Amino acid sequence: MSKIKALVLSLALLITTAGAFAYYNFIADVPLPGKTIASPQLQQDTIFAVGAYGLRIATKDCFTVAITNTEVSKPKKGNTWEEIWTLKVCERVGRLPIQFTINEDGTTSYALDYMNIKWKTIGTTAKKK
């Protein structure tokens, strides 16, 4: 793929994603609430992927996604640790497992465990017809 074509595709993806976030109310100010041990920069880097996942499961009439809590689920051992970030998407709350790894070059990577997120519905209101 040519560099220009790759650049155009990257810009299109960025504009589309930015547009989606502009339409929704995504609440995630750094530092995040809770007991995360991720640095502010790592929190910021991880927020985008967590928010994008929240948008994927939002219903068509839901416009608010928020990270409401963070906690360490497996303490730091060597260069890795795991956390649970609580994601609120309108009337649904999910606990998303995230594994963090400090790489040999000093950078930190993360992996969201979408398959093991636990969702529950909170306070629904029935519509009268």
Image (cartoon, rainbow, N blue to C red):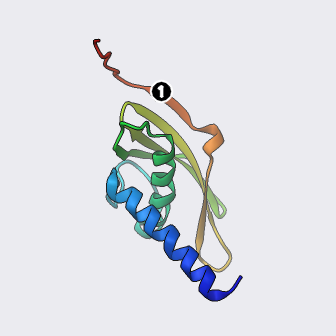
Residue 108's image quarter? Answer: bottom right
Q: In this view of the protein, can residue 75 be seen by the observer? A: no
Q: Which quadrant would the N terminus be assigned to in this image?
A: bottom right
Q: Residue furthest right?
A: 1
Q: Looking at the picture, how far across and down is residue 42, in whole percent?
A: 48, 66
Q: Looking at the picture, how far across and down is residue 126, in whole percent?
A: 32, 15
**Vertical relation: 7 (above or below) 66:** below
- Identify the residue at image location x=43%, y=34%: 93
Question: Three-letter amino acid code at disc 1?
Answer: Lys
**Vertical relation: 110 (above or below) 34:** below
Q: Nearer the viewer, residue 62 or 4?
A: 4
Q: Which residue is mark 1?
A: 120
Secondary structure under tag 1 reads: strand
Q: Looking at the picture, how far across and down is residue 120, in whole percent?
A: 47, 27
Q: Which quadrant would the C terminus be assigned to in this image?
A: top left
- Identify the residue at image location x=33%, y=59%: 22
- Identify the residue at image location x=40%, y=39%: 89
